[in-house]
């Protein structure tokens, strides 16, 4: 169960967030519930009542149990115990939530049970479920509707002729009644709303401009005159709502039982077909088999049997292996096992350059269960010595979506690697730029790092040969639109319609000076220069060894050497003996002390002496909380322990730091950091969260959660694998 009480089920890009009793309330904000597929909520209400009341939860469902199982009863008391018990099992497969309700009589005479299930689908886009208050207008022809099926009910959302999504609820035995539920009689969701976007059985969704959804559409704008003229019609339609109540009257034999099978099919616009899993047991068996195949591949099964972690040839120091105690080794093994299981759940389907089917790590639940360039690449790098197939598929999927043109709305540029891919309604109608969004300064060099690291780790150079055109295009982006030729650095300019900051610390204000003032563009963040250096050196190796182009390799090596020399000159803060966080558009050093310096160790751009001093500084008390290294050292003006990127602790950030420390031979520091992260994992049931608060271990005996963290989250799940590499003496990748 997640920290907020939700039960999370995931498979093949479909996930369900349920209450401990197995329901869906229509909650929004930091932790929405429902059934989700392709960035849309396909089940926004799922409320079971027995004999007119919500059942008591005797045993709540819990994460990790397959299928999810809860034990419920009708209201009762000591003198009048419940006449029957409901055993509820739930599981997900691709596009499907399957459920089994087994009612067991507790009495020696026949018992009649009245079951009702309130169901609805609001088809809300993930972007409008967030707690940031943004609104996204819809055109006048956007409408939801519901209809009865012979075995249940179907919910449909249409937006003109271009968009149609459906949710079907199928039941065996079929419900005896399917009735409309007036909006005013529906139980309110956890956010105080009557569930989802206001809409009718045949009515218009929301209020919006007549041309909403065209390129460059602006969220939050007011309705047009045409839409206001139709407001009375919408208001009347919205009173009916699309929620349906499905009802059964069941007779239980003396001490006998009856069963009810439920199947919810999520069919987003343009999605492939749903899985054919018929029962929770079948779905759970299939899921367990998939997890087992990923976490315990058979010996000799191919590249996923693992490979030895090795430091790249330009490693600054050949490090000794830090020694863990038997207890620490056991803890690391448990964290790795949980991480692998979570990675198995977070894999999502993708498509390669030749339309081949791929499986890549989705970034995390609930907001990012899709291909994310930076997250997917770093996750694949952490897992590379142990599960290299993730890297292969991630490389192919990103190559298939590499930029080919200039488009200001999506930040696409030729050769640039995508930051994220979305499939929801708002992305499709360009109300948000994230359908295929390229606003990242670091994914393109990281793509090149992963390509060479994969060849190095596996000995398979065929992929590097196949992706030579994409790799050369990525290098051309580094030198061209990326800014190396014009500015001397990889730079980004804040995107007013997308991301203000385009490195991994992408929240507003994350890239700042020690006084808290933000760096203004074009911004050259430190870690991106390290990634670029590593990418150039590695691509030069591919050019020599695989592509047979020594002249190109020499050119890349020369650019890399020049970049490294200038970096020491321009980014180093002599008074603080530490690298600057960034250079702003005027060439000023952003002098806030930040964890990004650890990424410079990982990439190898720092010389050995500076690298070792930087690594030791990162483990000082103002940086290291006792649990992990903070994103920003405490005591500085902009530091805040609950800030997203200005004082919190991110496990994946610490994984990169651990690999960098190992690369520079800082064995004691690796062990200190590993101990903190393993204690954090143990406190979270061995599942590392995406991010935790920056409070020191002396402030509280357990890690303080960050309020809006994703869990499970891919690069956090892969962090124990990176620790395993680091403590085994593997620096870099």
Image: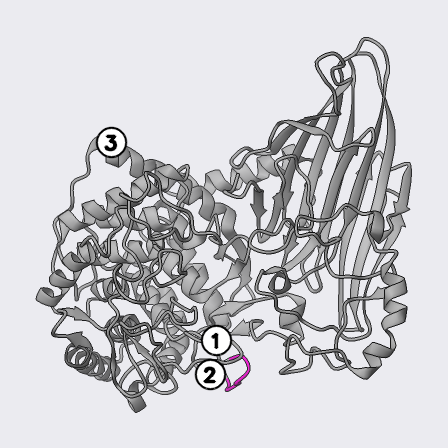
- Span colored in magenta: 405-410
Residue 373: image location, x then y, percent = 44, 66
Instruction: Report which residue position mark 3 lands on.
Output: 327
Residue 615: image location, x then y, percent = 17, 59
Helix, strand or loop at label 3? It is helix
In this picture, residue 726 sits left or right of residue 242: left
Instruction: Report which residue position mark 1 lands on.
Output: 438
Is residue 656 shown in magenta?
Answer: no
Q: How many residues crowd mark 1 within 10 Å: few (<14), some (14–19), many (20+)?
A: many
Residue 136: image location, x then y, percent = 67, 71
Nearest to viewer (mark 3 / mark 2): 3
In this picture, residue 21 sits left or right of residue 506: right
Identity of the residue drawn at 31% across and 91% down:
486
In this picture, residue 195 sits left or right of residue 345: right
The quadrant in which residue 249 appears is: top right
Q: How many residues crowd mark 2 within 10 Å: few (<14), some (14–19), many (20+)?
A: many
Residue toward you, 687 or 378? 687
User: Upstream in the sequence, badge 2 or badge 1?
Assistant: 2
Any part of residue 263 in sight: yes
Q: Are marks 3 and 1 in contact (CB under 8 Å)?
A: no
User: Upstream in the sequence, badge 3 or badge 1?
Assistant: 3
Residue 579: image location, x then y, percent = 19, 71
In the image, is residue 103 above or below residue 557? above
- Which label was assigned to residue 413? 2
Outermost residue to the bottom: 486
In the image, is residue 537 above or below residue 618? below
Q: Are marks 2 and 1 in contact (CB under 8 Å)?
A: yes
Q: How many residues crowd mark 3 within 10 Å: few (<14), some (14–19), many (20+)?
A: few
């Amino acid at each position: 169960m997640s920290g907020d009480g939700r039960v999370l089920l995931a498979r093949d890009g479909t996930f369900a967030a349920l209450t401990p009793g197995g329901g869906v309330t229509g909650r929004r904000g930091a932790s929405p519930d429902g059934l989700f597929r392709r960035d849309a909520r396909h089940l926004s209400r799922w409320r079971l009542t027995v004999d007119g009341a919500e059942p008591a939860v005797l045993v709540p469902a819990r994460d990790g149990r397959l299928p999810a199982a809860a034990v419920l009863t009708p209201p009762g008391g000591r003198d009048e115990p419940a006449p029957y018990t409901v055993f509820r099992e739930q599981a997900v497969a691709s596009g499907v939530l399957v459920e089994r309700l087994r009612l067991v009589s507790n009495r020696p005479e026949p018992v009649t049970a009245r079951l009702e299930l309130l169901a609805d689908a609001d088809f809300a886009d993930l972007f409008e479920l967030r707690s940031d208050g943004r609104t996204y207008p819809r055109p006048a022809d956007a409408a939801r509707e519901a209809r009865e099926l012979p075995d249940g009910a179907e919910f449909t959302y249409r937006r003109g002729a271009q968009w149609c999504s459906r949710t079907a609820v199928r039941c065996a035995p079929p419900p005896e009644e399917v009735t409309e539920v007036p909006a005013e009689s529906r139980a309110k969701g956890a956010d105080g709303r009557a569930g989802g976007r206001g809409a009718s059985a045949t009515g218009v969704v929301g209020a919006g401009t007549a041309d909403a959804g065209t390129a460059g559409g602006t969220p939050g704008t007011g309705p047009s005159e045409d839409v206001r003229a139709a407001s009375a019609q919408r208001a009347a339609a919205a009173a009916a709502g699309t929620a349906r109540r499905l009802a059964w009257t069941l007779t239980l034999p003396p001490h006998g039982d009856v069963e009810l099978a439920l199947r919810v099919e999520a069919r987003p616009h343009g999605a492939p077909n749903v899985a054919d899993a018929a029962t929770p047991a079948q779905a759970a068996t299939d899921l367990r088999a998939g997890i087992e195949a990923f976490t315990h591949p058979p010996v000799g099964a191919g590249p996923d049997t693992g490979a030895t972690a090795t430091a790249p040839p330009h490693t600054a120091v050949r490090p000794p292996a830090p020694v863990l105690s038997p207890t620490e080794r056991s803890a690391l093994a448990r964290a790795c096992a949980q991480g692998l299981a979570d990675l198995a759940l977070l894999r999502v389907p993708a498509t390669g350059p030749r339309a081949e089917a791929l499986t890549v790590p989705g970034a995390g639940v609930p907001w990012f269960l899709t291909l994310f360039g930076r997250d997917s690449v770093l996750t694949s790098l952490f897992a590379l010595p142990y599960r290299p197939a993730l890297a292969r598929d991630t490389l192919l999927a990103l190559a298939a979506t590499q930029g080919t043109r200039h488009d200001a709305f999506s930040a696409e540029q030729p050769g640039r690697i995508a930051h994220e891919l979305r499939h929801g309604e708002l992305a499709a109608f360009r109300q948000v730029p994230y359908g295929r969004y390229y606003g990242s300064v670091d994914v393109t060099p990281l793509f090149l790092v992963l390509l060479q690291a994969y060849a190095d780790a596996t000995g398979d150079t065929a992929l590097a040969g196949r992706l030579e055109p994409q790799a050369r295009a990525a290098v051309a982006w580094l030198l061209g639109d990326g800014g190396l030729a014009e500015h001397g650095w990889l730079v980004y300019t804040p995107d007013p319609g997308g991301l203000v900051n385009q490195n991994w610390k992408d929240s507003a204000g994350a890239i700042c000076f020690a006084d808290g003032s933000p760096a203004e563009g074009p911004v050259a963040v430190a870690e991106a220069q390290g990634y670029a250096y590593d990418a150039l050196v590695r691509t030069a190796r591919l050019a020599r060894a695989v592509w047979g182009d020594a002249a190109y390799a020499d050119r890349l090596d020369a650019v890399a050497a020049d970049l490294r020399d200038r970096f020491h000159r321009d980014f180093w803060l002599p008074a603080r003996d530490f690298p600057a966080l960034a250079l702003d558009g005027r060439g000023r050093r952003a002098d806030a002390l930040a964890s990004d310096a650890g990424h410079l160790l990982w990439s190898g751009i720092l010389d050995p002496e500076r690298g070792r001093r930087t690594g030791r500084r990162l483990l000082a008390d103002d940086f290291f909380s006792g649990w992990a290294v903070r994103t920003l050292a405490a005591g500085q003006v902009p530091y805040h322990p609950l800030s997203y990127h200005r004082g919190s602790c991110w496990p994946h950030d610490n994984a990169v730091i651990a690999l960098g420390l190992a690369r520079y031979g800082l064995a004691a520091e690796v062990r200190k950091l590993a101990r903190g992260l393993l204690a954090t994992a143990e406190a979270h049931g061995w599942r590392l969260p995406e991010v935790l608060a920056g409070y020191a271990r002396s402030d509280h005996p357990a890690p303080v959660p960050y309020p809006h963290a994703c869990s499970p989250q891919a690069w956090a799940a892969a962090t124990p694998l990176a620790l395993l590499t680091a403590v085994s003496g593997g620096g870099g990748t």
